Every structure is written in C-alpha cells, then in structure tokens.
Image (cartoon, coloured by chain):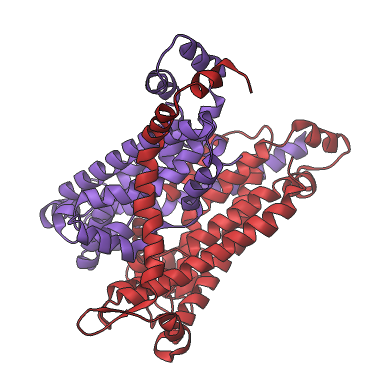
Amino acid sequence: MLRQRAQFLGVHIVLIAYSALALGPILLVVMNSFKNRNAIFGAPLAPPNAETFSLIGYAKVFNASHIGVYFLNSLIVTVASMALVLLFGAMAAWALTEYRFRGSTALALFLSIGIMVPIRLGSVAILTMMRKAGLNDTLIALILVYIAQGLPMSIFILSEFVQQIPRDLRDAARCDGVPETRIFFEVIAPLLRPAIATVAVFTIVPIWNDLWFPLILTSSDSTHTITLGVQQFLGQYITDWNAVLAALSMAILPVVAIYVIFSRQLIAGLTSGAVK
Amino acid sequence: MAEPVSQVVASMPRGRFAALLALFLGPAVAVYTLFSIYPLIATMGLSTYTTDAEGAYHFAGLGNFTTLLTDSLWSKPFWNAAWNNLIFFCVHMLVQNPIGIALAGLLSLPGLRFKGGYRTLIFLPTMLSVVIVGFAWSLILSPLWGVAEGALKAFGLGSLFRPWLGLPSTALVTLSLISVWQFVGIPMMLIYAALLNIPDELVDAARVDGLGHFRIFLHIKLPLVLPTIGLISILTFVANFNAFDLIYSVKGALAGPNFASDILGTFFYRTFFGNQLQLGNPTMGAAVATVMFFIILAGVCLYLFIVQRRLRRYAF
C-alpha cells in the first residue's frame, strides 16, 4: 500500500511537470502581454503588477491592424464551413449506411481518400480554378475548400453515429408512411447532435488554425483570416515586443476559452468516436 | 433481408430511389469531387506541362520530374528538403510518439486522480494555431528575451544555451521539437483511448500473477495497442510530409538559415508561389506536389498493406 502511494506520487510529479511544460510557454506569452516593455525584458517570469501593468501592446494591435475584420472573417469561414460539413456529411453518411445500392462501397472508399491525402497538394489547381471562377480572394473560396477538406472525416465519424441509432425509430416512421427526407431531417438529424462535438474537433480546429489556404487564396486585408492576419502582423512588428505578445495573446485566448468550456466534450469525442 | 424497412425503400420506383440518393449524396460528392479530388488530378496533369515566356502551356511528359530529380539547380534543394523532412519525421517518431505513449500509460493507471485535468492541460497546445506556437517559442528561445537562457541558468546549465533556432546545425531539430511539444497530445489521446478499451480481465489476471504496473504495461497493454501505434505512425507521417505552417511562420518561405530548415512543404510553396529569389512556377510546383503525393501515398500503402495486416493478428 505504501509502495503504491509512493509510486503514485512519482506519477503525479511527472504529470505535473509535463503539464507545466505544456502550459508554461502559453502562460508566459499571455502574462507578458499585459506588461510594459521594461518589465517584459527585466523580469519575464514575473506576473504583471500595478506598476508594470500595461495595455499598450493591445492598443497597438487594434490601431495598426484590422484584427476585428480578421476575427470576423475567421468566424464566418469556420461557422459556414462547419455547418455545411455537418449538413452534407450527415446526409451522405445517412445515405451510405442506410440505403443499399450498386457502387455504395466504392463510393464510400472514394469519399475516404480525403482522410489520408491532404487537399493541400491540389493547391496549384485550386488556385487556377478559383481565379477562373472569379472567386479568388473571397471567403467563399475558403469555405468551399474547407468543406471539401472536412467532409471525408465527418462522413466517416457520422456513419458510426448513424449506425448506432436504433432501427426501430426509422422503421416505425416508415410504417407510418413518413417520406424519407422527413425521416432524416426530423427523426435522424436531431439524434446526431452528440456527434457535433466529435466532428468539431476534426473540422473547426484545423479550419480556424489554417495558414496555407488563406495564404494561397486571399490577398487583401479584407479577406484575411485571424491566423494569416496575425502571422503577417507579427512579421511586420517583429521588433515591437508589446505588440507581438498582445497579438499572440489575442489569438490564443479565444481558443483557450472555448477549449476550456468544451474540453470535456472535445476529449470525449476524440477518444470515443474516431478511432476504434 | 426481408425487413419491412428495406421493403419500403426497395419498393420505391427506381427513379424516386435514384432521386433520393442524389439528394442525400449529391452535395457532399459534388463539393468533395470538385474541390478535392479534381484539383489533385488536375495538379498531376499540370505537372506534365511547362510554360514558356508567353505563358502558353506545352506538354513535357515527365520532363519536370527529370529536372526536379537530376538538374542540380532543382535537385539539390529538393533532396535537401526531402532529407530534412525525413529528419523532421524521425524526431516526431522518436520523441513525440514515445512521450505520448508514456503519458497515456501513466494516465491510464487505475485509481489515478486528476486525470481529466492533466489530459486537458497536455492537450491544450494542440488546439492552438501552429503560427502562434511557432512564434511564442521563437520569442522564448530568443537570446534577446533570455527566458530559455534564464531557465537553463536556474539549473546551472546556462553555458549550454545557444540561439538554437538561428544555427544551421540545430534549427531543424529545434523546430521539430517545437512541433513535438505542440502535438504530443494526439498520440497521448489515441493511445489512452485504446488502453481504456483493453478488457479488465486481462489486466486483472496479470495482477493476480504478481506483475507490477510497469511490466503489465510493457508486456500486456503495449502489444494490445500496437494497431493504434501503427495508426499514430501513419498520421504522423502524413502530417509531417505535408507540414508547412511552422517552418513558414518561424523561418519564412526561405526556411533559413541557408535552407537548413527547408522541408517539402516550404519547398513546394517557394516553387509554386515564388519568393525573393525566384518567380513562381505553377507547373514545377505541380510536379513537387505530385512527388509529395506519391511519398504520402507510399506511406499510406505501406501502412494499409503491411503494418495493418500484420498488426491485425493482435487486435481483439
């Protein structure tokens, strides 16, 4: 018993140390973003106090960049892509698992190519297509690409959820003569709500954090997303540590806040849904 | 199967059934085909063309690939990027995945408290943008700020400090370790989930036989999660050979110092989009993307045909 206690103490020490390693750098950046320049360099590890507290970095970010626009763009792109990935993904997952038809296995395989092969490798042709269609430098271009990117994984995950729905539910509705479309939208779709968290891990996070496609497909300030906007701001203001730390913190804090609120669902989704 | 369900659907007129399938599958298949599969194929097609000074396309067969692999102007940076990418991948395999497995092993110990808290904290960096993580670490490792140096000094190791990100000999490994720091949560989570699925009876039997936690983990649990280790290996492979954001945001498109941190993703970007040193070249960029596609495809096939099949035997 005593030996087990000692072992557990050791385990806790290792896990606390590793957690500190994971959290430390993030905390350091956020903490120093609220300090004046002298304090950032003088005592980097000290939390801000009444004397060293300063919001000058944040003021600079707001004045010198369109951070509000970037944030809104990211929000529009992520929400729109996510909604359509969920809708199209759920519909496809339902049809693939529920209906038997010739070629359904081949179609499922075709749709799963995108799980392993990154869409990024098609960028040259994507840019050409978007230019031809006049969609270059629009948020629509980003949304279309992100839907295509998110669909394979979401169909895969949602198919597992569809399979778990008891057969009786759809059978009862069918016997009552309810049309198939209504069965899906009114009976099945509401039951897929728990799958949203799982799909979100694999869809929202990569879209919100993506640098590649905004870099390739958007060129003007009005279409930059937060990740690209912050990246370019950081490049320009590299010597202004207040501004850099503030910009980093503004990109970190919303993600951390959402993560803390939903971490239980996110982690449950990650550990249960995808990999069995 | 003569269930009532299938009968309702099966008794549908053919045209209506087709319309139903088109309605449900149409949007997903259309968007996915148009913006994912078609661009991949079109990119491969484009890689067999060259452009002349007027911008007209000429069919060149495998000419771009010959240039890429043999013309020293192209082949030197290409092989440099490919080799660096391999190192980038090896660091992940040797550091990220073992640490992830070890953390999962610790977290799955029966009766351990605060599991949820540890998991949440260790997974946190994975949620952040690579751009943010790269920049935060470049500040921390900067000799200007001195945080890393100060931390080493605290352990009496101050003399070991170097501007790791700036030195050609250490830049790539340092960047790899930053990436490891960020993504260690993924193998940890996947292995943790797999460990939880191991039936209790197996572990209990070993405990009755007097095996300690560590030997149970090594001899019983680890062989049972080998398929998941295979999965995290292929996920790491695909992610690493497609990586770009971290190098680009810390070192820029030129992946300095002197291309020491250049990997295939940054090489592809420079070739396709251009930079201070060269003009963008879409057809050559398409050729690089095609090579990257075949590298990733080779990895996935190896996983599907060899690793997966052999590991199946241990699966339950």
Letter of the red chain: B
* Location of the C terminus of chain B (image quadrant): top right
Closer-to-camera residue (A203/A247): A203
In this view, the residue farthest toward the left is A63
In this view, the residue farthest toward the right is B209
Q: Quadrant of residue B7?
A: top right
Could you tell me if residue A80 is visible in this image?
A: yes
On screen, residue B225 above or below A240: above
Could you tell me if residue A56 is visible in this image?
A: no
In this view, the residue farthest toward the top is A176
Q: Position of residue A50 (x, y in %)?
A: 22, 45
Left or right of A37 on screen, residue B269: right
* Location of the N terminus of chain B (image quadrant): top right
Q: Position of residue B231 (x, y in %)?
A: 61, 52
Please give the name of the residue rendered at 58% of the width and 45% of the height, measured from the top-left corner.
B190
Q: How many marks?
A: 0
Closer-to-camera residue (B129/A97): A97
Q: Position of residue B135 (x, y in %)?
A: 34, 62
Q: Quadrant of residue A228?
A: bottom left
On screen, residue A215 above or below B287: above
Q: Position of residue B105 (x, y in %)?
A: 66, 45
Closer-to-camera residue (A95/B14): B14
On screen, residue B271 above or below B75: above
Letter of the purple chain: A
Q: Quadrant of residue B297?
A: bottom right
On screen, residue B299 above or below A270: below
In this view, the residue farthest toward the bottom is B72
